[in-house]
Amino acid sequence: MAIQAIGQASLTGTVSSDDKALGFSATVFIEGSALGGATNELGKYEIRGIPAGTYSVVASAVGYVRVQKRVTLPASGSVVLDFNLAEDLELLGEVVVSGTMKAVNKLESAVPVEVYTPRFFKANPTPSVYEALQTVNGVRPQVNCAVCNTGDIHINRLEGPYTMVLIDGMPIVSGLSTVYGLNGIPASLIERIEVVKGPASTLYGSEAVGGLINIITKQTTNAPRIAADVFGTTWGEVNADVAAAFNAGKRAETMVGVNQFYFGQRIDNDGDGFTDMTLQDRLSIFNKWNFKRAKNRVFTLAARFVQEERFGGDADWEEAEHRGGNEVYGESIYTDRWEAFGVYELPMEHHVQVQFSANGHAQNSVYGETEYIADQRICFGQLLWDKALGAHHAVLAGLTMRYTYYDDNTPATATADSLAPQNLPTHTCLPGVFVQNELSFNPQNKLLVGIRYDRNSLHGNIFTPRLNYKWNSLDKRNTLRVSFGTGYRVANVFTEDHAALTGAREVIIAEDLLPETSINGNVNYVRRIYTRDEAIIGLDATAFYTHFDNKIFPDYDTDPSQIRYTNLEGFSVSQGASLNVDAMKQGFKLNAGVTAMNVFSEQQGVRERQPLTEQFSGTWSIGYAFDKAGLSIDYTGYVYSPMDLPTLTTEDFIDPRPAQSPWYSIQNLQCTKRFDNGMTCYAGAKNLLNWTPWDHLPPGVSYMGNTQDPFEQNTPPGELVFDPAYVYGPNQGIRGFIGLRWALN
């Protein structure tokens, strides 16, 4: 029993939120002193031994807005001071859906989900979500071709086909067009982007082996009435986003967004005769409808259309004269893509939804004289049932069906008759069923168990189980998550690996490729720290391990003139650890992360590091806002350690290009001015260090090899040939940008 000192007072009270006591989760302290304490199970606190005087008393709890009150204490006695805290939805109350397919508070999710708001991406404006993800720790937009600059998204250094991209939870993106799912959605219509690192195949199927990226668009009720965002760069890039939302009668609301990106300058700063940056002309139209129904049942429909023309190659290439020929090398890609998706909640007592999506992707491409003409259509349907069983069980079950039609002009869709091959489009049916149970033992412990069964029409039965456990401390400032899961993937080389299409190397598929399978485990720890000087610090640490069998492996080394695709006779591993740190204090914001990785394959006792894979990466976004002046400054960037590169070195020939990339960093700076009329002006510079990969080559050596003879008609034996697969970073140097942003809410 504590004894109060003579001439000193005590402070007591209750900390609550909406008349609910915050037991064990709140802290009360006197600012500028060491005096303070935590609430008990009833939400009550007591601070003793306080000298007489006037003080500022602060109450805080994870997920709630801090409250500060002034109180005058007498020389002795007890004073009652109660606090009522409001939930801080912006800080820790984000609602996430990607981990469990239903809306839950991020803090309560058993699956670790990272959430990024448009405010995070506005610190470094980009023309697409694909480029914006450069500053997300552990996520890397990888350029796959030095000529046409097409790429994909890597999560924890697993290649793009292992990453599933969704819009509003619908798997509308396929291996043929991953990057297109991240292009052309106006930023003003994006509510948030959720990232799950690690297999999500139990809920989402075969393409979620490495993780998923879920773009959540705004509801029609909270979208801006009118919004526009236009910026341009000193290289000649122009990006425009325009969006509007309005009522369509009494029972429907809709929003429309249009994105246009154009870049038409043939820039050749490295002097190799080829364009440094791909010419692009892209138009995207997005439309979403929300229909009002009885009992607030959900009914939404959305559609998107993307059209793009892309060119990279010889600066003298002309479309009418040279497209598809062997006189002047160029890579020209025409893309038309449409998507439609929606959700309809059935008029039943139980929570049952029908989710559906469909997309079509037509691509007409030439890579020099190599044509790639492809047509892909996917239909997806899902019946989802969500039911709480008692106070401790939440069951989610679903029936799914996915149909894929794919046709192209490659051997992938031709009969085996080499004398008279015939076209043979593929038709793949993939029905599935999944169920998961989220068991809440108590407010601190939660267990998520799930399993999925798929029946692939080409490869048979596939099972993918998952297990997730979450523990949090009583004050919710510490959270531990442990995850285990499996995944699988059926690959298509021609739709997923750009190197197979360039014509620079002969493609050899040495065997019937089997589905890849994976086993993954990770441990995630999150810590929130509230300091007495009103700073908030968050730590998010993860250790991950993924083991692959039957991994499809592109072999560049056995014969440098070929790419040989086989299932790995051994195994492949992606393992590592990451740490994210975020901090806020008044106008200051910091978000930084580092990831250390070891990605390798092993067969016949020989271990090889995966090409084009860094062992260390770091990202940062640092900002400071001068609120009274309406000004803010943002400094963003990323750094990568050396990677092994696919050179053409043989026993008889040594490629003069380095076999390993150097350390490199891209850094950006932006200044933003906000006006009272809703207008925002921003300007800055990208790639402040003016880093380009060709600056780090020996004198006289071209980044893409012999660009003077890309068709290898006159290259003598023993000399470097044309090779656009040697690419690891962006080829665009320093450039300035300026933009205007305006919204009417």
Image: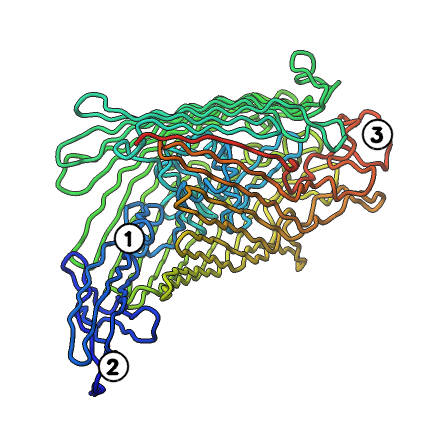
Q: Is residue 636 left or right of residue 66?
A: right
Which SS class for mark 3?
loop
Secondary structure, mark 2, is strand
The quarter of the picture where the C terminus appears is: top left
Q: Mark 2 — residue? A: 49
Observer-side mark, 1 or 3, equals 1
What type is the residue that disc 3 sits on?
Thr
Under circle 1, the secondary element is: loop
Marks 1 and 2: which is nearer the front?
2
State if disc 3 and disc 1 touch (CB < 8 Å): no
Pointers 2 and 3 in contact (C-beta within 8 Å) = no
Asked if one can make out residue 423 in the rendered structure from this viewpoint, the answer is no
Q: Extreme top residue here?
A: 320
Q: Which residue position is annotated with label 3?
A: 715
Q: Residues within 10 Å of mark 3 (few under 14, many from 20)?
A: some
Q: Which residue is mark 1?
A: 88
The alpha-carbon separation of the residues under discs 1 and 2 comes to: 32 Å
Determine the image quadrant of residue 108: bottom left
Label whose residue precedes the other's in the sequence (2 or 3): 2
> Who comes first in sequence, dot 1 or dot 3?
1
Spatial CA span between label 2 and label 3: 88 Å
Q: Name the kind of residue labelled 2 in the image.
A: Gly
Residue 240: x and y in percent read 47, 26
Q: Residue at x 12, y 41 (%)?
A: 349
Figure quadrant of residue 31: bottom left
**Could you say which disc has been placed on residue 595 in the image?**
none
